[in-house]
Image (tube, rainbow, N blue to C red):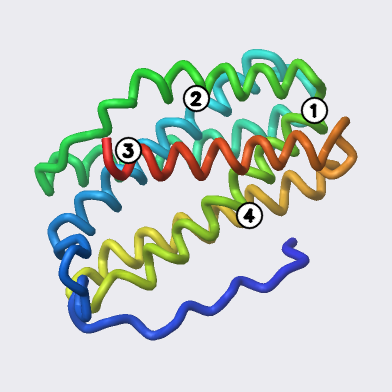
Amino acid sequence: MTDEPIRELPGHPKVTGEGRLPGDPTREEILERIIRVDQAGELGAVRIYAGQLAVLGKGKSAGELRHMAEQEARHKEAFDKLLIERDVRPTALSPLWHVLGFALGAGTALLGEKAAMACTEAVEEVIDEHYAAQAAKLGDDETPLRETIETFRAEEIEHRDMAREAGAREAPAYPLLTGAIKAGSRLAIWLSERI
């Protein structure tokens, strides 16, 4: 299905946060940021697909959108559980991501199925990079969390590939649309880690 191989991750440290410098986040801060931002990202993804399905729920891409939405809901559920288990506060921006995610999904879907797929492709490319960087930071002391992230990363890559196969690159103003979505996704990640 994919036209690009999954990039191999570098070796993992033995302990998360190993080799940190003064001023770098502590092991606990790294873990809190990872869980907080990933839960926020999966909330945003659930809402993007809800917006797309609200507009395209009877279109030819509805089956693919439902499949991706179900996987994102499962990802969110896993990170919701980790928030509680690890006593990590969610981002204070969750209400904003709830609204903006739906608006992004519905807005791109209103531009057509190919624009909705361009949205999916752009978001998933950023998430692939994001999850790869997180997995590389996690030490052997966090193998279960790393494996969860790597499993979800593979599913996000599947979503990207499905979007490409559905014609994402044929969307109107594709470079502009995907560039803006990628920039917004990277900003949302940065903010959600910290706020």
Residue sitting at x 22%, y 80%: 19
Q: Residues within 10 Å of mark 4 (few under 14, many from 20)?
A: some
Q: Which residue is mark 4?
A: 158
Residue 101's place in the image compared with 110, above or below, is: below
Cα separation between marks 2 and 1: 17 Å
Given contact means CB atoms under 8 Å apart, are the residues at marks 3 and 2 in contact? no
Q: Please, what is the three-letter code of the amino acid marked with disc 3?
A: Glu
Q: Residues within 10 Å of mark 2 (few under 14, many from 20)?
A: many
Q: Which residue is mark 2?
A: 47
Q: Which residue is mark 1?
A: 113
Residue 52 falls left or right of residue 192 = right
Q: Please, what is the three-letter code of the amino acid marked with disc 1?
A: Glu
Residue 186 falls left or right of residue 76 = right
Label 3 secondary element: helix
Q: Which residue is mark 3?
A: 77
Q: Please, what is the three-letter code of the amino acid marked with disc 4?
A: Glu
